[in-house]
Image: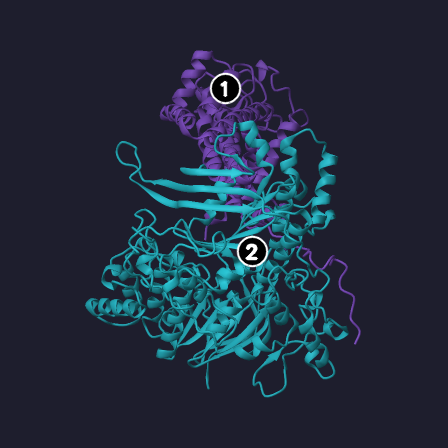
Chain colours: A purple, B cyan
Amino acid sequence: MTVTDRPETLPSAEADTNGPAGATSFDWRYVWYQLRRSPLAIVGLVIIILVLATMIFAPVLAPYDPNAINLLNRLAAPSFEHWFGTDQVGRDLLSRVIYGARTSVTVGFAIVGISMGFGVVIGAFSGLAGGRIDTVIMRFMDVLLSFPSFVMAMALAAALGPDLINAMLAIAVVRIPFYVRLARGQALSLRERPYVKAAVTFGSSRLHIVRRHIMPNSLAPIIVQGTLDIGVAILTASALSFIGLGAQQPTAEWGAMVSNGRDFLLDQWWYPTFPGLAILITAVGFNLFGDGLRDIFDPRLRAK
Amino acid sequence: MSAVVEVRDLSLEFPTYRGPVHALSNVTLSVGAGEIVGLVGESGCGKSVTSMSVIRLLPPASNRITEGTIRLIGRDMLATGERELQDMRGKLVSMVFQEPMNALNPTIRIGRQITQVIHRHERVSRAEAEARAERLLAEMQVPDAKRVMKNYPFELSGGMRQRVLLAMAFSCNPKVLIADEPTTALDVTVQAQVLTLLREKAKERGTSVLFITHDLAVVAQLCDRVYVMYAGKIVEQGRTADVLRRPLHPYTQALLRSLPELGQPKQPLASIAGTVPDLIHPPGGCLFRPRCAFAHDRCVEVPPLLSGGGEEVQHAAACWLLADGHRDSADTGRSDLPSNEATTLPAKPAKQTLLTLEGIGMRFPVGANWRGRPRGYVHALNGVELEVQRGETLGIVGESGCGKSTLGQIVMGLLRPTDGRVLFDGTDLGNLPGSEMRRMRRRFQIVFQDPQASLNPRMTAWRVITEPLAVAGGRTTSWLKGKARELALQVGLRPDQLERYPHEFSGGQRQRIAIARALALEPELLVLDEPTSALDVSVQAQILNLLLRLQRELDLTYLFISHNVSVIRHVADRVAVMYLGQVVELGPTAEVLNHPGHPYTRALLASVPSLDQSAELAAPVRGVELPSAIRLPTGCFFRERCPFAAAGCDQPQPLRGAEADRHLVRCHRTGELPPA
């Protein structure tokens, strides 16, 4: 009897090797596998990619200068020259919708980025610190949450002055408490994990624990929330622009365009319709994708 | 004997994104009328999948049965419709699961949950069903069945819930009972009671039982016949006595050898090299081949079940060694204990106390009244006095809720005791300033039970291992990586795998990572909080060997916390038995475990199932429930459950012993008790 060579993967007799490659944390193949099973998330992803591509390649895609005025060709109906028609000063609406993506979507990302950044840091520290600090922070957040968020954003934007940046900041502030709550909840559960306790036993500082243990492990649900929020942020920014507190002329911004076009809705339907559709489709795209991501990160929520 | 359960050639796979997992391949087994059959194997071997597919409990979309038949009481289960299956489940075949809390609906009273099962299958009046439920509970030795009927599951202890589940399972007199690790979540004293109950009731009613477990000792105590599974295949089958006494398959042999029960204390255990194969890409031929010490040319073919010969009927194993010409070599396997690590224990240096616990008490507040003050306290620890000598292993053994883990956390400074002092090397940890404490912390480290939860899933292995050093600061990445390689070699990990994330390692490897991390600061004391309880026995053997080797090489002191008496017996020099937040017995391991002085220690030891079938399971504990730690009993804490309770037990008992400092017992009747 000859004893066959053992596979070379076996080292010393004591060590066991080649653990199962599970999909417990981040595995892109797993994400893709789940994504493929949810067609709506794919639709969302495609929309997001198209919107991002539109933003990046706006100068290439736009047939005209979005701010070029052509008073001879005002309020023209959609045609081969102007697919989406023109507005009251003859600017090409297609070009303005394309350039508008740059403003509106950037604003959406910026709002979410700001509120997420502040919210996560505040929430993680609040949860980890506990006690009185936690109570004070959370009650303040409750106060912020108790105002209707749009009214609050309106008030802030009005106080700061009608300007796109101010509108953005106002909306971001209003959305901070959502992230604080989310991150605090994560911190509360994570701080009981043995690896956080182990980190305490070798004398880690609170900063180290937040940075190394709490943050990376609480990101999944926060990213999901953020993705869902981008749609909301775009809508809110557009709404502020619509009531005149956001983007000012001549900036191409979807909300402002709908606002201006509203006067022409009955006779020149295309003017408010196309920017409105752009808002709708983008918001839906981010929401669909966010829902899909949530299902991937939290299989318990998956529909049967 | 006609078979009630008959599984033939069953192969089943789970489709995943990485390809199908071949969870079962050609599983054939049968359970005769009135027979108790064990299905034993390590985690992931397919034993639960087998049992679930017998009653078609797996969600149909999640798996594919590629071949085979399942017959239950003469019915083809693969051709039976869902409605019919529902009629069968609970009536003809019922199931008991591992986690009794999850198997009961938390919002429905116990009585209703049992009568629901009865009403589902039989036309009986409500009063009749209730009377039957109460009778069943009483039969399952539930004290005060009438009251329990009105309880919600959360009001009952784990053992009580498992009795309720048994009552439910037996409520319609099923022909077959499938029990999936029903006692794994229970403490040994409760496990002993539940196992005895299960066997009695099944024999009484002639119910066939398919009993799934990872514990060979439980099989020895309970089962008539046993099937051993490995990687989705039955590798050995036969009468329990034959399989445990004369195992034929190298896997069964190795599994038995890796049990600490059978090893010499402090000596390395035989362990199985490598891990269970990836069932997405299984190795061809015999699935055990990559880990088998006797693998040879023929093993690339799938081995059939071959009889072991002799008069042992039905005893067979799927191994080519049993084919003619190889039988001799199979026998040589039994004397294969490793000799390379044979140890001579170094002469113990003079006693030097490293850790002292002085009158440690710990209370946790419960609830809050309207002024925000706690309504009561859980008394987790009640005056624990212990000394740990440098270089020794002090084992702490006790059942859940006895306070052993709380004690570990207090030693680590993760919890501040409400009473008493912790002295490390003569320094009181209680009133050290932060910076001093941080420096002190380096000298004692902890290894937790669940290696999955104790490693940050988003840090690579080398970052995990060197985290304690990185926290101290001032080290470059390349220095840290070098250090991680050193530590990895020390704990038997491959240094080239250090860029991986924890989930890419097996359970045993993860525990090695956790140990390496604990060693990074070169501590003197390691608190080991159930370090092998989440691991399979073959892996447990590897980790125990590693810990014993590290202790010798690095001159470490261990505080080894475990519920497993066999593990404590294997590793500890001295042992402290804890009960309800007190040390009830303390002394040299062999002395305490061979000549237990305290009635509780005796009960604990008698409840541990033994591989020796002739040893009867006994549970000499009066009353079934552990007293509440919120309202502590007066006098001796064990008084109400103690079979030897007498006058004088209502006074607090001190820890004392005849020989000062050696074997201490917290019982005033030690001398009067009958010999254990």
Q: Which residue is mark 2?
A: B572
Q: Residues within 10 Å of mark 1 (few under 14, many from 20)?
A: many
Residue A269 relative to residue A35: left or right:
left
Residue B168 relative to residue B336: left or right:
left
Residue B309 on image: x %, y %: 63, 86
Q: Chain of mark 2?
A: B
Q: Which dot marks residue A169?
A: 1
Residue A258 relative to residue B515: left or right:
left
The three-letter code of the residue at mark 2 reads: Ala
Residue A116 on image: x %, y %: 52, 28
Residue A97 on image: x %, y %: 57, 25
Marks 1 and 2, how far apart at CA? 63 Å
Q: Residues within 10 Å of mark 2 (few under 14, many from 20)?
A: many
Q: Chain of mark 1?
A: A
Q: Residue B157's quadrant in the figure?
A: bottom left
Q: Is residue A267 visible?
A: no
Q: Secondary structure at mark 2?
A: loop
Pointers 1 and 2 within a single chain: no
Give the residue at the far front of this rendering.
B659
Q: Which dot marks residue A129?
A: none
The three-letter code of the residue at mark 1 reads: Leu
